Amino acid sequence: MRRAVAALLRSVGIASQSYDSCSTFLAASLADEPACLLLDVRLPGTSGLDFQQQLAGHGIHLPVIMITGHGDVPMSVQAMKAGAIDFLTKPFRDQDLLDAVATALERDRKRRAETGELSALSARYEALSLREKQVMGLVTAGRLNKQAAFDLGLSEITVKLYRASAMKKMEARTLADLVKMAERLKIGMPG
């Protein structure tokens, strides 16, 4: 089955790697590119359903497509609740597998892009001074400059300077941009 799936994927220009067990997969170094994982429910040792549950604990966040020759509704529900992209019953049509793989690869591309953007945003936030972070937290929580100044024991003009500096370092064009960034970073009003 592994060879047949690999040949099908190769026939449409999708590179693949096959593993004979979960431990072999975990021992391998994964390429840093969009990918997905095709898991059979019946695997030697750990079941595909159990392994799907364990992936996050191993720091692996690949989209999963579950395949089986002996599926039932509860099994497919379990796989889908755990985040599987699709649940295919053997024998499945080649096009169904290719569609599921295309969907999974696109989802992983988006996840990687979002993770990269969030990482860059987080790095910009970490480059802020303590005061810039405090001012950013207050103004993005809805405090006016004069309220933030009172809260921090600063002058309003000083708060405006810190706010402008934070916006520049965060690459925010408007306060609305800064608020969206704070939401993505889960930054609340300082305590």
Image (cartoon, rainbow, N blue to C red):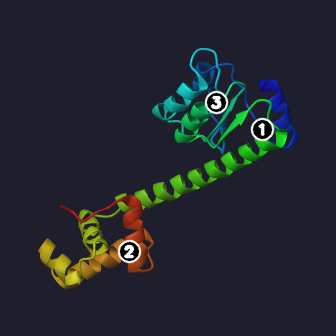
Residue 100 figure quarter:
top right
Q: Provide the residue designation for mark 1.
A: 15
Query: Alpha-carbon neighbours of circle 3 within 10 Å: few (<14), some, or many (≥20)?
Result: few
Q: Quadrant of the C terminus?
A: bottom left
In front of the other: label 3 or label 2? 3
x and y, in percent, of residue 134 in the image: 24, 67
Name of the residue lying farthest toward the top: 45
Give above or below for 191 relative to 46.
Answer: below
x and y, in percent, of residue 160 in the image: 27, 82
Name of the residue lying farthest toward the front: 73
Q: CA distance from mark 3 to mark 2?
A: 54 Å
**Residue 90's disc number:** none
Query: Alpha-carbon neighbours of circle 1 within 10 Å: few (<14), some, or many (≥20)?
Result: few
Q: Earlier in the sequence, mark 1 or mark 3?
A: 1
Residue type at mark 2: give it: Met
Q: Provide the residue designation for mark 2.
A: 167
Q: Earlier in the sequence, mark 2 or mark 1?
A: 1
Q: Earlier in the sequence, mark 3 or mark 2?
A: 3
Q: Are marks 1 and 3 in contact (CB under 8 Å)?
A: no
Q: CA distance from mark 2 to mark 1?
A: 43 Å
Q: Provide the residue designation for mark 3.
A: 72
Residue type at mark 1: give it: Ala
